[in-house]
Image (cartoon, helix red, strand yellow):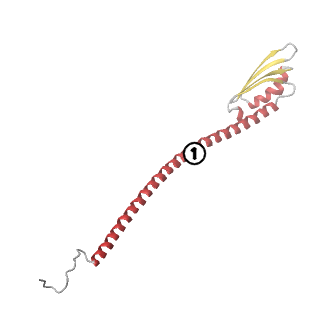
Amino acid sequence: MSYSLTKPQPKVIFAVDTKLWLFFTLLVLASFVLFKIVVYLYIARLDSLSLDYANEQAEYQMATSEIEKENIVLLQDIEMVSYSEARNTIIKNSLKKLLSIVPDQIYLTTLDIDATSFHIKGYTPSKELFVVLLQSQLESIFSGIEVTFYPTGNGWFSFECKAVSKQGIDNE
């Protein structure tokens, strides 16, 4: 005996609307999870790139500091070379001046120059010729002169002259 006029139909737990609503909800949640994973992977990649760039920057800074140190050394070398060149030019000019005052009758065999003294050896026909032609000019340049003569067998004299300057040879 049946009290209903319709045939019984199977009952489903979820209706079609609920299934549709549930499907789209799960799809949105999956999209959010996937988006979050992609963002985390992108952040991890950016962190890795950031570390790589930081390491590269540190290498460049070290290379820059090494180049700056080399630059300082090179600048000091340039300064030293220019100082030496200027000093050599001054000494060369001083030497030219000193040699230009030596008369043709006097022959020089040795010439030693340091910062404050001048030492020459050579031959002269007479002591008076040396005193008149060379020693008087050297006395006007140097503060102290000491000359020693040695007779040679041919009538000439060998001499040693030591001259000292208080201000230095290269300042003449």
Residue 162 rendering spot, x and y as whole percentages = 73, 23
User: Would residue 51 be found to the left or right of residue 126 on screen?
Assistant: left
Q: Secondary structure at mark 1?
A: helix
Residue 73 rendering spot, x and y as whole percentages = 60, 41
Quadrant location, the C terminus? top right
Furthest residue to the bottom? 5
Q: Quadrant of residue 27?
A: bottom left
What type is the residue that disc 1 sits on? Ile
Q: Which residue is the site of mark 1?
A: 67
Quadrant location, the N terminus? bottom left
Residue 160, relative to residue 139: is it above or below?
above
- Residue at screen point 19% across, 85% down: 6
Residue 123 rendering spot, x and y as whole percentages = 83, 20
- Residue at screen point 59% across, 42% down: 70
Q: Nearer the viewer, residue 33 or 47?
A: 33
User: Would residue 142 be found to the left or right of residue 16 on screen?
Assistant: right
Q: Nearer the viewer, residue 140 or 153?
A: 153
Q: Nearer the viewer, residue 146 or 82?
A: 82
Q: Nearer the viewer, residue 138 or 44?
A: 44
Furthest residue to the top? 153
Residue 62, relative to residue 143: is it above or below?
below
Residue 45 rendering spot, x and y as whole percentages = 44, 57
- Residue at screen point 27% across, 76% down: 18
User: Would residue 106 be found to the left or right of residue 53 on screen?
Assistant: right
